[in-house]
Structures are given as structure tokens and as C-alpha cells.
Image (spheres, helix red, strand yellow):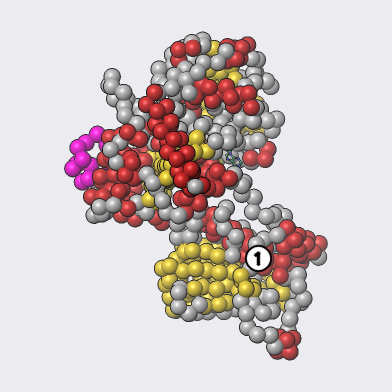
Amino acid sequence: MDGGAGDQLQCSAAVERLNAAGQAIKRQVIRKATVLLGRNEFQEIIIRIEDGKVPQSYVLKEFKLFTKFVKEGKCTVQLLPENIQLLISNCPPDQLNVFLKTLSIKHQAWQTLKPLTYRDKLKAALPRSFETISPLQQRDVQKANELRSKATSKGLADRTNNTMRTVPGQQVKRPRSDCDFSPANPSKRPVLSLPAARKLNKEQAAVLTAVLSGKNVFFTGSAGTGKSFLLKRIVGSLPPKSTYATASTGVAACHIGGTTLHSFAGIGSGAAPLEQCIELAQRPGVLPHWTLCRHLVIDEVSMVDAPLFDKLEAIARSVRRSTEPFGGIQLIMCGDFLQLPPVSKGKEKAAFCFQARSWRKVIQVNMELTEVRRQTDQSFISLLQAVRVGRYCHTLMESAYHKIERDGILATRLCTHKDDVELTNENKLKQLPGSEHVFEALDSDPSQVKTIDAQSPVSRALQLKVGAQVMLTRNLEVERGLVNGARGVVLGFEPGKQGLPRVRFLCGATEVLKRERWMFKVGGGLYVSRQQLPLKLAWAISIHKSQGMTLDCVEISLARVFECGQAYVALSRAKTLEGLRVMDFDPRVVRADPDVLLFYKQLRKERLLMQVGVES
Ligand SMILES: Nc1ncnc2c1ncn2[C@@H]1O[C@H](COP(=O)(O)OP(=O)(O)OP(=O)(O)O)[C@@H](O)[C@H]1O
Ligand SMILES: [Mg+2]
């Protein structure tokens, strides 16, 4: 199911006929279209648009692709000789990605075949046919790459600049497009490869299937079982216009490329009475969220409290004028209730959202991921499992002597209190000799700075010095170990005006970091962006901010742990026991909430009953 087989799209489509100046003179809109990729009787590639009535087919010979907005489920295919363009929108982004890659590679591989002349075709007299295209294979990729290298070695690309051969023996003009897939200049393009999506495991695939069946799904699992990883894949498999990816905290939202649940809902802190919240939810910038949303995705749901959940459910029914649970919005939620609980207001313990009145009415399927992916060492996994359910483990005491400093990279201290984090980072930076380099962020809309700050993993101003301990805040190159959470130290600054920092990472790589761009959804479906170096100071971070992260080397002082699940969240960030040092250990801080343990016990019992029911 990972993005589909690449032979079809479910989307909205518009077919435009263009005049010589490239303006649309006729336009047909198909709101619910299926776009298919196939071959005709001569093995030529056909793109076919179905609207449930008469399909339209076009032979794909020469085309331009516009793919800048694939992540938002949009692209344009311009068929050059026909002067027709096909505008695709609201397509699940992963599906579109695989489709375009299939189209591009199959088309290039097809160019290696001997072309049929018009006479050949007449002579062949084959019956007309349409067969859906087969999934991409390594041999297609190989053929396409052969063609690329031939074109390069002949100097074809350089000689003809923007022209290339689409059909051997026949040279044609090929204008530039903004496409990653189109072979406009083979010599400058990387070698093609099969789509590199990391595969879901069986459990994850089962959850995706349940989600695509339209049910309201809650899935849970220990830290590192790939809940957020799967959630990203789920978001990529749903139509973007009606899918809202959210999380209970800004940091967690950023991991899945979404917004906070609060900014989706538009009801401030949510503390106002229901009637007032319903009014707030109908403000112009917010109302479309509620009316357009058909799939609401929520990560780190353990931090959503019961009153908020009930309120959102009631708002959805009221605003959408529907009596269905959650106003008919499909809910897809995940989290681990044995991690951080909702923030309590005052002395009273906050109720979990599974204790909300509407929870049972809303959730139709409960699922659990059991295979831990963050850690590989079985004994460390077992230790973490014990801590998760509130059992103290002696091995942790031994970790107090772990020497985890290497190549000038120190352990990151995970703190229970936010103030400690800021103080530690500020003081440590001050203590370093040398001058401070300040990197200011570039925000697309400075009036939205508060919204950006709440969701961005990088700050408005980043202060660095040689020797500063830093952490990567984005996946740059997964294969080289340059991943979100990777730890490093600043070695120096490049000469020149920008003075970009050179950082050595624990994985061994040394890298000069450039500004990256983050996009954030704000009210009314608008996007704003922040450009900043993908770094933050890493002498210390808070346990709350570390929720959801995978970290290289951490040091934890557990003496001041004050929440159930907090010790587990902190410990489970480490990939290995060797990369972990626990100090000030107090066995009493390892606590699991009894309400959660009971809820999980109940869930398991129900699932077992269901399985027995299915088998018998
Ligand atoms: N199917 C998969 N293939 C490859 N890597 C995976 C897969 N599933 C998860 N991972 C990796 O495992 C690590 C943990 O995944 P993830 O952060 O999604 O776990 P989680 O369940 O959300 O954890 P937490 O409860 O701490 O938020 C990540 O580095 C992720 O890339
Ligand atoms: Mg997660």
C-alpha cells in the first residue's frame, strides 16, 4: 500500500486545451477523477483520465511536468504536441510521487525501444487495447539510466542545451520545466533509482489499511515503535485538501509536518465554555478547518485532556451540523498513554482523553504497534519496557559511569524543568572562549512570528561559538546519519559574509550547514515559512520537548521527575544503553499511571476477545 503501485491516482483533475500562446481556451473540470497509466497495443505509454463516463486517453510522447507542489498533492502534465495540459490536485501526495516516478522512468525506458513508424503501425493492424502499466522494476531504471549516460557521453545534452531526444532518431525542442523527474539535461541529473520509501512493517501496514477503510482509529505502542513514522505515511496517503495533521504539542506537530491541535481548532486554550468555543471555531480564518476537514490526524494524544477532547467533539457536531460522532470527521490518533500525561491545571490530576465521555462513541478501532524500531539491543528494549510499566531496573544505576563523550561531543542533559534548560545552554555558551556568531531566521511573514515560534524546531536567533554543542533539527541525509536529533559540535565558521558553521557529528560526518526552510500552516489554509540553520543548542533540552525524539547521547538526572511516564520518556529517547547516563537515580520516580495500566489491560482483553471471535 506504500503510495500504491504507481499506475493510478485518485484526485481532482482539470483538462485544459491551450492556444499557441499557452493560454487555456477550453477547460473541463473533473472533481472526482481516476488517472491511469497504461500501454496501448504498440507498447506506447498512455495517460487516461476517467470520470465515470467516457475516458479520455493521450499517448505520452513529449511532455513537461510541473512538480513543485507534489507534497500538497498537485502537479501539471503538459502534453506538448497536443497542446493540452492536465492539472492534478487533491491527490494523496505519496500516491502522486510514485505515479510521477513511474511515469518518468517508464517513459525514459520506452525511449530506448526502436520507434515504430506510422507505416509499421498500419502494417501491424493490432486491435486497440489499454493495459495498466506494470509496477516499476529495476530493469526499467537501468534502461532509463543507460539512455541518460548515452546522451551524456555523446554530449547531446550540452550541444543542444534545452533540446533532447524523446524518440530516437528524431530531435525535438524541449522547453524547460521545473520537474525533478524530467530529463531536460541528463548530464546534470543524478542517476535514477526506485522510489526509496522505507517499508512499513506488518503491524504498521495493518493500521494504514484500517485508516484507508475510513474507520476512526486509535493506535498506540511503546516509545519508538514507529507511530509518528507511520502517521507521516498515513498523512501522505490521504487527500491533502481534507486532511489535517496535528499534534498536542508544537514539537510533535513538527515531526509529522503538521500544526498544533489548538491552532487547528482555533479555540485558544480551550478553557472557555462550549458555547463560546463554538463561536470561536466559526471565525472566518478557522471555520474552513472544521468544514473542509474529513480526516483529522492527532499525534501525541496522551497529552490531550478529556475535557478538550469532549469539547472538540461537540464543536465538530455543532459546526458541521451533524449528529455523527465528531461531526463525521474521521479521527486518526496515536500516542502512548504511558508517556507524558496532559498538563494538569492546578493541583488536580488532568483526566486522560480515553476517559472522555465521547471517547468510546468516537473510536471504532484500537490497534497496537509492538515492534520497537528506535532501539535494537533486546536487553535495553526489555529494560525500557519494565520502566514503562513502572518497574525499577538496577541496570540503570550502572549507567551512571558510562563515559559517552567522544570527539568533543558531550552528552545532552535531559531536564525536568524548562528554566534549567535555558540557563544551562546560556551559561555553557557564555563560558566558551571566542566570539559569538548570531544567525537570525528569515520569516516569510513577521506578523506570524508567534505562531511560527510555537511550531518551529529552530529559534528566531541562534547564537553559536566554536565548541558549541548542537543538535540537528531536521533529517538532512538519513544514509549518512545526518538525522533529526543527531549530536555534534561546532568546529568553526566558513570565511565570508554568511560565516556558516562547520559541525562535526557523532556519526563521523563533518558538514557545513546551510539555512533550511520550514513551512507552517496558519489559519485559512495559508502557509508561512521560516529559514534558519537546522541546529539548536544541545547542552540541555527539556524532557517535554524531547517527547517524540530519537537522540544519540543523553544524560539524565531523574531526581526531580514529577510526572508519571516522565522517566520513561527521557530514557526511551536513547538509541543504545551505551549512549545513556542516568544520574541522581531515585527508584520512586519510575511510575506508571494506574488508570492507564487499567485502560491498556482492558484494551488487550477486548482485542483478544475480538480475535477469538474472528477465529471461531
Ligand atoms: N517501518 C520503518 N522502517 C524504518 N524505520 C522506521 C520504521 N518505523 C519506524 N522507524 C524508525 O524508528 C524510529 C522511531 O520511530 P518513531 O519516532 O516514529 O516512533 P514513535 O512510536 O513515534 O516513538 P515515540 O513514542 O517516542 O514518539 C525512527 O527513527 C523511525 O524513523
Ligand atoms: Mg512519536
Give left or right: position of 318 versus 395.
left
Q: Position of residue 342 (x, y in %)?
A: 36, 29
Q: Along the line of sight, which residue is nearer the eye, 156 or 484?
A: 484
Q: Looking at the image, which is closer to me, 72 or 187?
A: 72
The amino acid at mark 1 is Ser
The kind of secondary structure element at disc 1 is: loop
In x, y percent, where is residue 491?
A: 65, 26
Residue 203 is one of the magenta-drawn residues = no
Classify residue 153 by image quadrant.
Answer: bottom right
Residue 210 position within the rendered picture, expressed as x and y whole percent measured from the top left: 47, 50
At x 46%, y 35%, the residue is 604
Q: Compared with residue 62, is residue 317 higher up or lower down, i.e. above or below?
A: above
Answer with the quarter of the image where residue 7 lies: bottom right
Which residue: 67% across, 61% down?
136
Q: Which residues are magenta?
A: 267-280
How many numbered marks, from 0 up? 1
Question: Between 373 and 180, which is closer to the camera in this rendering?
Answer: 373
As drawn, the residue found furthest toward the right would be 153
Name the image quarter holding residue 122. Answer: bottom right
Asked whether the viewer can see residue 501, the reply is yes
Q: Mark 1 sits on what residue?
A: 134
For the residue carrying disc 1, how many other residues have a C-alpha within 10 Å: few (<14), some (14-19), or many (20+)? some
Above or below: residue 159 compared with residue 616: below
Write the residue at 65% across / 85% down: 127
* Residue 468 visible, this orientation: no
Residue at the image point whose x is 53% and y is 76% from the top: 84
Does the beta carbon of the residue at mark 1 sit less than 8 Å from ligand 1? no
> Nearest the camera: 204 or 277?
204
Quarter of the image containing the N terminus? bottom right
Residue closest to the far front: 616
